[in-house]
Image (cartoon, helix red, strand yellow):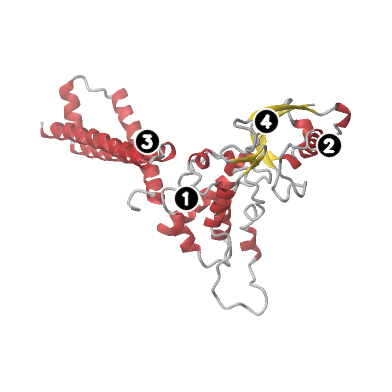
C-alpha cells in the first residue's frame, strides 16, 4: 500500500517535501487503522514524526489531514482510503515537524472560551444537582476531545485564527452557555457579541463534516446565535 | 462599537435580506405584469408616495446589507490594519454615494 507523507524538519530543511512510503501487503491486515500503518512506517523510517497516544479516538492526539480531509488516524480504517494515502499536517497551523503542528493558538482560543463552570452560589452539602432533561442539553457538546480537526478545517479560522475562536472553542462556549448550573451565561454571551469571536463563522460547516466524534459545532454556533437573539428580544 | 457589529450586524443582514426578497419579488411582478409604457409613467410610478417609501426603504436595506457583507469579506481577507481601514472607508464611501444617488432619483421622481 502506497503512502505520500509530508516531511519537514526545521533543523535541516528549508522547504517541506512529500515522501513516498510503501507498506508491504503482507503487513496490511483487515480492520487495520491508519495509525497502525503509520506505526509500521515509522519502523521503516524512525525520523517520521507524528503525535499519538491512546490509539482509540479518545485522546485526540493524532489529528492530521488525510487525503485532503482532517481526521484522526487511529479511527480511520485503512481500507476506506484511496491510495496513495496522502498525509499532511493540519492546514493553517504552524508545522513543528512532519505531521506535528503547533496548537498553541488553538489552546489560547479554547482558554478564551472560558471552558469551566462558573457558579458562585454557596456549595450544597452534596453535589450540584441537575435535572436530567437539562443534562440532556449537554449531549453533543461535552463529548469533544479537542483534537482540532474542526478548527483546522475552518476557512474562517484559517484567515483569522487570532481573532475568531474557531469551532472547537465555540462548541465549548455553547456547552457552558447551555449548562443550567452555570451562572455566567450573560457574561459569556456579552463576550462573544463582537465582529470576530463568534460572527466570523459563515456556516461553511467543514467543522461538522470532519468531526471524528460526529459532533456538530456548526449547530452549536447557531444555537449560541439563537440564545443571543432571544436574550436581546 | 456595537452599533453595527456582532449580533446586531448579523441580525440586520437577515432582516434586510427578507425585506429585499419581498421587495424584489413585488418589483419584478410589477415590471413583468404592469410594465410602464414610457419614462413618464415610470417616473409617475416611482413618484407615488407608497412606492417611493418602499423603494427608499429598499435602498437603505440594500446599503446596510451590502455594507455588512462587504465588511465581512474585508475582515476575512484583508489583514494589515492600514489597508483594511482604507478598503473599508472606500467601500463605505462608495455605498454612501450610491445611496445618495438613489435618493436623488427618488426625490426628483417625487417632485415631478
Residues at discs 3 and 4 both on one chain: no
Disc 1 is placed on an element classified as loop
Which chain's residue wears label 1? A
A231 above or below B70?
below
Give me the residue at 66% from left, 64% from top.
A132
- The image shows residue A90 at horizontal and vertical percentages of 62, 39
What mark, if any, has residue A31 been given in the picture? 2
Residue B19 visible in rendering: no
Give the residue number, with chain letter if any, for mark 4.
A67
Q: Are marks 4 and 2 on the same chain?
A: yes
Query: Which mark's residue is nearer the viewer, 4 or 2?
Result: 4
Quadrant in which residue B17 is drawn = top left
Give the alpha-carbon distance from disc 1 to disc 3, as whole Å: 29 Å
Mark-to-mark CA distance, 4 and 1: 30 Å
Q: Chain of mark 3?
A: B
* Left or right for A25, reference A227: right
Amino acid at each position: 500500500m502506497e503512502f505520500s507523507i509530508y516531511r519537514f524538519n526545521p533543523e535541516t530543511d528549508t522547504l517541506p517535501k512529500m515522501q513516498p512510503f510503501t507498506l508491504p501487503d503482507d503487513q496490511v491486515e483487515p480492520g487495520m487503522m491508519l495509525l497502525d500503518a503509520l506505526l509500521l512506517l515509522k519502523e521503516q523510517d524512525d525520523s517520521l514524526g507524528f503525535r499519538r497516544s491512546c490509539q482509540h479516538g479518545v485522546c485526540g492526539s493524532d489529528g492530521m489531514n488525510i487525503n485532503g480531509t482532517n481526521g484522526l488516524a487511529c479511527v480511520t480504517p485503512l481500507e476506506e482510503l484511496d491510495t496513495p494515502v496522502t498525509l499532511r499536517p493540519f492546514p493553517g497551523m504552524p508545522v513543528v515537524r512532519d505531521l506535528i503542528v503547533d496548537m498553541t493558538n488553538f489552546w489560547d482560543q479554547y482558554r478564551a472560551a472560558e471552558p469551566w463552570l462558573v457558579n458562585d452560589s454557596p456549595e450544597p452539602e452534596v453535589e450540584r444537582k441537575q435535572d436530567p432533561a437539562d443534562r440532556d442539553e449537554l449531549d453533543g457538546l461535552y463529548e469533544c476531545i479537542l483534537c482540532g480537526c474542526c478548527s483546522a478545517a475552518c476557512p474562517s479560522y484559517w484567515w483569522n485564527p487570532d481573532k475568531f475562536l474557531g469551532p472547537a472553542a465555540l462548541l465549548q462556549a455553547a456547552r457552558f452557555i447551555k449548562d443550567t448550573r452555570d451562572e455566567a451565561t450573560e457574561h459569556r454571551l456579552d463576550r462573544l457579541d463582537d465582529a470576530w469571536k463568534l460572527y466570523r463563522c459563515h456556516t461553511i460547516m467543514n467543522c461538522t463534516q470532519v468531526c471524528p466524534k460526529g459532533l456538530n459545532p456548526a449547530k452549536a454556533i447557531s444555537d449560541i446565535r439563537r440564545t443571543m437573539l432571544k436574550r436581546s428580544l | 462599537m456595537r452599533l453595527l457589529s456582532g449580533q446586531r450586524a448579523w441580525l440586520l443582514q437577515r432582516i434586510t435580506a427578507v425585506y429585499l426578497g419581498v421587495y424584489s419579488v413585488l418589483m419584478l411582478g410589477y415590471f413583468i405584469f404592469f410594465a410602464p409604457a414610457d419614462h413618464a409613467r415610470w417616473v409617475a410610478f416611482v413618484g407615488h408616495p407608497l412606492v417611493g417609501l418602499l423603494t427608499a426603504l429598499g435602498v437603505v436595506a440594500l446599503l446596510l446589507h451590502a455594507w455588512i457583507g462587504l465588511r465581512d469579506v474585508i475582515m476575512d481577507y484583508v489583514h494589515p490594519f492600514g489597508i483594511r481601514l482604507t478598503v473599508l472607508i472606500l467601500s463605505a464611501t462608495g455605498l454612501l454615494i450610491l445611496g445618495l444617488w438613489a435618493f436623488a432619483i427618488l426625490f426628483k421622481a417625487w417632485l415631478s
